[in-house]
């Protein structure tokens, strides 16, 4: 102590207090930046040319954070093409998800008794709670898009080829981690959306031969998703997958330092990789050029995400999960539509009646070795796709990265993408609008009610202002007895229900079912409590056995519930 | 093509980086500031809170009408012989003028009415209270052997407590009348073996007690009471509106048979909770009951005069 103190006192005596403080502060700053003075950092942010010898290499060689970033890029990869910054943005979203996720963790308990109440707490009692949840949810969806696009870009520019095979391999791991992170997060709100999407997702494991039941049991912690399953998915979401992601992110980044960013395909001789042998004149130093670019991209991307979350985007929260009630038209998250389409494949293959004989024998042959269609399309095909993705750099025999030499690979990629698109559209439960492709709807009478009072999600009926719901019974008609001035929205919805019913009488659904011709109905509004009303749609019709039937569906609407 | 080339070779200048980077950072901070202000100063959280409170009451309403209305009535006014009123001033108290709950005073419950509703709904009432109702309040929480999850118990509590804004004073049933079960007492007729077997079908295989009341025997409050069904049937087969609806019965026995095997033929106007509705009664009793069970049941019902 005495010696350090003495040195400080001596320095102050020799150079004065002001100079000593300046020198010591700069010293501390330089240690923090692993070799850059304050003036160096200012120069970097302003884009000034470096001093000689260049101090800006030091953070790369001596600091931790920049040692996994290259010191320089080839100037050809600093434009938008060929990287489109997709890898960088993927890592940025991983960071945003981590930060917002830690915020949400503070207010969340992974227990069926508490989880849903915690979600409501986050939305109603935590300042920034709704904003953070929107950021986290939207960020997750964007991250799936960005990571997938990053993979596509890498395939199209053939950057997976020698020597970057293993970089690609770690990238596929990161893609799977991203998907699993997103999917495991799906369960945590413990609403109907969460519960049924994950029940369907994990039930696919059930179809696996021999180990299906055990795998399912391990995932869910019990035959059905409950306390055990929620805790497991929570731990997957906040520990296992982030940990795997972090490890592979490190490797992935290191490989980029090791091999450099691959140049645009047309710039290299076939079979050669010159990303690390960059001529001095073509070098663009990481600091300042790349660093400032990245700070800008981070700021702009985060701002877009923040503004979207604060304005139009609202993360969905349905009603409390209920294992006894499966909501009509339950679907997987959109990025797994293709998987849902795959399971529906016997129904969505474009084989007309004349060709349907192909389908049946295929199923029969598989049945001989104990395979059901669900097993084949749900359990065997997806892992094959994943293995193929991993194997691409090792099985691609073409040494050239040039587009014109890769007609086969690029065509296969386009076909694969079209297939995924086709399956994804086929996976939409209510069918592709206008075509009905993939439609699985039921009785048209039920579908009319579902259209206006869906089991879950946004409902046009619930969005009617409370005051406009005038108590009474209104036969469904084009001109219902509702005052257009007092209750325009209510009137509009009753007319729309009538129009929908009439439409289904004349136009069959994609499965050929029509609403019975003589069907008629009414809407009843009752006052249950001072601030609670009930809205009932009743439809009477004659079924195919000539028996009179009545179907009704109701919604309870509270004055404050604010669904619009 | 030129534009395409410009886009893919785009590289922002240092000036653009500084400007757009700063704009981004300022936008982020401004968004956070606005979100913070609307959440805390403009009471967005309060609005959200009210909205979710409303949605939970809606969820509670669904539970109430599925599980509770059968005994406590559609308006919570209670059913004679089945359950007391829970939407009355005596039970809930009232906000204006401030009235305490008489029920809580009577039983010496020191907590709030909400906690009382939640506790009784969850665990039921474990002992016969002094007011002798036909049955004790059963437990509804899954942890006490009932059908409901805890969140459903909490929601239905919110729904019932929501009557406090305008609790009822008229037409409420606070205590059971002697010989519980709605309507007039049937004239006792000694039952033979066939009629006795029919009574067992009524209470057992037929599942009739869930919806129909017979004073002293059953307290179902969904369908019409059976107290004097034989006398009612005798009159009904001669009524014009019965014939107009397509009723083919000409005597008591055939009327009862028709009502059981084809319940939608004629819908009677008076059920305990308002007008009776088509399609509510079990439709397949002809398949689920053995022929002799059906005969015995009809024989029993014919004694109710």
Image: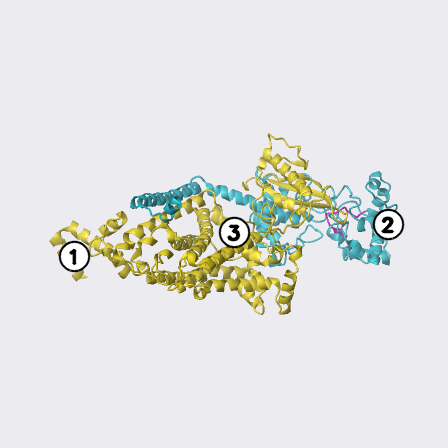
- Tag 1 subunit: A
| Left or right of B271, for residue A338 | left
Q: Which residue is mark 3?
A: A117
Farthest-out residue, top: A485
Q: Residue at x 84, y 58 (%)?
A: B292
Secondary structure, mark 1, is: helix
Of the chain colours in the picture, the one used for chain B is cyan
- Tag 3 subunit: A
Q: Which chain is yellow?
A: A
| Left or right of B283, for residue A255 | left
Sequence-first tag of 3 and 1: 1
Q: How many marks?
A: 3
- Quadrant of the image for the N terminus of chain A? bottom left
Residue A458 in view (yes/no)? yes
The foreground one among B29 and A104 is B29
In magenta, the rendered stretch is: B217-227
State the image coordinates of residue A253 (x, y, percent, origin top left).
36, 60
Q: Which residue is mark 2?
A: B253
Secondary structure, mark 3, is: helix
Magenta: predominant secondary structure element? loop
Q: Which residue is mark 1?
A: A8
Q: Is residue B272 magenta?
A: no
Q: Residues within 10 Å of mark 1 (few under 14, many from 20)?
A: some
């Amino acid at each position: 102590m005495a010696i350090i103190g003495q040195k400080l006192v001596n320095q102050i005596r020799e150079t004065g207090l002001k100079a000593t403080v300046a020198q010591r502060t700069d010293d501390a700053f330089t240690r923090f930046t692993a070799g850059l003075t304050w003036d160096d950092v200012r120069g970097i942010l302003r884009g000034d040319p470096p001093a000689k010898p260049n101090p800006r290499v030091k953070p790369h060689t001596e600091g931790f954070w920049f040692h996994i970033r290259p010191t320089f890029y080839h100037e050809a990869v600093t434009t938008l093409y060929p990287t489109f910054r997709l890898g960088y943005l993927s890592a940025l979203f991983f960071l945003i998800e981590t930060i917002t996720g830690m915020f949400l963790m503070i207010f969340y308990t992974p227990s069926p008794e508490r989880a849903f109440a915690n979600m409501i707490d986050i939305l109603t009692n935590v300042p920034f709670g709704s904003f953070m949840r929107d950021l986290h949810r939207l960020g997750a969806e964007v991250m799936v898009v960005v990571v997938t696009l990053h993979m596509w870009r890498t395939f199209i520019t053939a950057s997976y080829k020698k020597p970057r095979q293993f970089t690609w391999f770690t990238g596929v791991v990161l893609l799977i981690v991203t998907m699993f992170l997103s999917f495991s997060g799906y369960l945590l709100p413990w609403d109907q959306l969460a519960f049924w999407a994950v029940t369907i997702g994990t039930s696919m494991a059930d179809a696996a031969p021999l180990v299906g039941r055990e795998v399912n049991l391990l995932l869910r912690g019990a035959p059905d998703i409950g306390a055990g399953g929620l805790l497991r998915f929570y731990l997957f979401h906040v520990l296992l997958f982030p940990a795997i992601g972090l490890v592979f992110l490190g490797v992935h980044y290191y490989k980029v330092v090791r091999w450099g960013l691959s140049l645009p395909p047309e710039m290299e001789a076939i079979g050669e990789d010159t990303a690390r042998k960059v001529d001095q004149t073509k070098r663009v130093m990481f600091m300042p050029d790349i660093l400032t670019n990245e700070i800008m991209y981070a700021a702009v991307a985060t701002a877009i995400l923040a503004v979207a979350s604060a304005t139009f985007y609202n993360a969905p929260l349905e009603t409390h999960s209920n294992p006894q009630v499966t909501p009509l038209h339950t679907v997987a998250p959109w990025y797994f539509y293709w998987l849902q389409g795959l399971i529906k494949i016997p129904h969505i293959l474009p084989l007309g009646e004349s060709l349907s004989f192909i389908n049946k024998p295929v199923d029969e042959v598989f049945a001989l070795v104990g395979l059901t269609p669900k097993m084949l399309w749900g359990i065997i095909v997806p892992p094959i796709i994943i293995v193929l993705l991993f194997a691409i750099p090792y099985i691609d025999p073409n040494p050239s990265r040039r587009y014109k030499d890769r007609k086969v690979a690029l065509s296969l990629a386009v076909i694969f993408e079209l297939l995924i698109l086709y399956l994804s559209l086929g996976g939409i439960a209510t069918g592709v609008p206008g075509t009905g492709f993939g439609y699985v709807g039921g009785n048209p009478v039920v579908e009319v009610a579902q259209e206006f009072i869906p089991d879950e999600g946004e409902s046009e009926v619930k969005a009617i202002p409370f005051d406009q719901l005038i108590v009474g019974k209104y036969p469904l008609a084009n001109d219902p007895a509702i005052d257009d001035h007092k209750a325009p929205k209510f009137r509009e919805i009753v007319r729309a229900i009538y129009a929908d019913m009439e439409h289904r009488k004349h136009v069959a659904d994609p499965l050929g079912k029509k609403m019975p011709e003589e069907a008629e109905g009414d809407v009843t509004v009752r006052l249950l409590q001072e601030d609670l009303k009930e809205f009932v749609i009743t439809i009477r019709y004659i079924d195919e056995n000539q028996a009179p039937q009545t179907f009704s569906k109701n919604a309870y609407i509270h004055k404050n519930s604010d669904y619009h | 093509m030129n534009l395409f080339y410009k886009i893919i070779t785009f590289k922002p200048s240092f000036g653009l980086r500084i400007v757009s980077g700063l704009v981004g950072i300022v936008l982020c901070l401004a968004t956070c500031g606005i979100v913070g202000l609307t959440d805390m100063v403009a009471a967005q959280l309060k609005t959200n809170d009210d909205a979710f409170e409303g949605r939970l009451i809606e969820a509670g309403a669904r539970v109430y009408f599925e599980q509770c209305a059968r005994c406590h009535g559609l308006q919570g006014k209670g059913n004679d012989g089945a359950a007391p009123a829970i939407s009355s001033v005596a039970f809930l108290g009232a906000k204006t003028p401030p009235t305490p709950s008489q029920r809580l005073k009577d039983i010496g419950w020191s907590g709030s009415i909400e906690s009382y509703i939640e506790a009784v709904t969850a665990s039921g009432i474990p002992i016969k209270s002094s007011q002798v109702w036909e049955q004790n309040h059963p437990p509804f929480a899954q942890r006490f052997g009932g059908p409901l999850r805890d969140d459903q118990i909490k929601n239905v509590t919110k729904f019932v407590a929501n009557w406090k804004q305008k609790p009822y004073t008229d037409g409420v049933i606070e205590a059971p009348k002697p010989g519980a079960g709605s309507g007039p007492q049937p004239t006792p007729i000694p039952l033979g073996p066939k009629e006795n077997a029919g009574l067992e079908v009524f209470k057992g295989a037929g599942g009739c007690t869930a919806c129909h009341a017979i004073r002293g025997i059953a307290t179902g409050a969904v369908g019409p009471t059976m107290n004097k069904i034989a006398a009612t049937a005798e009159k009904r087969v001669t009524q014009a509106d019965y014939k107009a609806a397509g009723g083919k019965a000409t005597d008591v026995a055939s009327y009862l048979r028709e009502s059981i095997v084809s319940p939608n033929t004629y819908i009677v106007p008076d059920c305990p909770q308002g007008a009776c509705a088509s399609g509510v009664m079990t439709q397949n009793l002809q398949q689920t009951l053995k022929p002799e069970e059906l005969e015995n049941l009809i024989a029993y019902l014919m004694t109710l005069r």
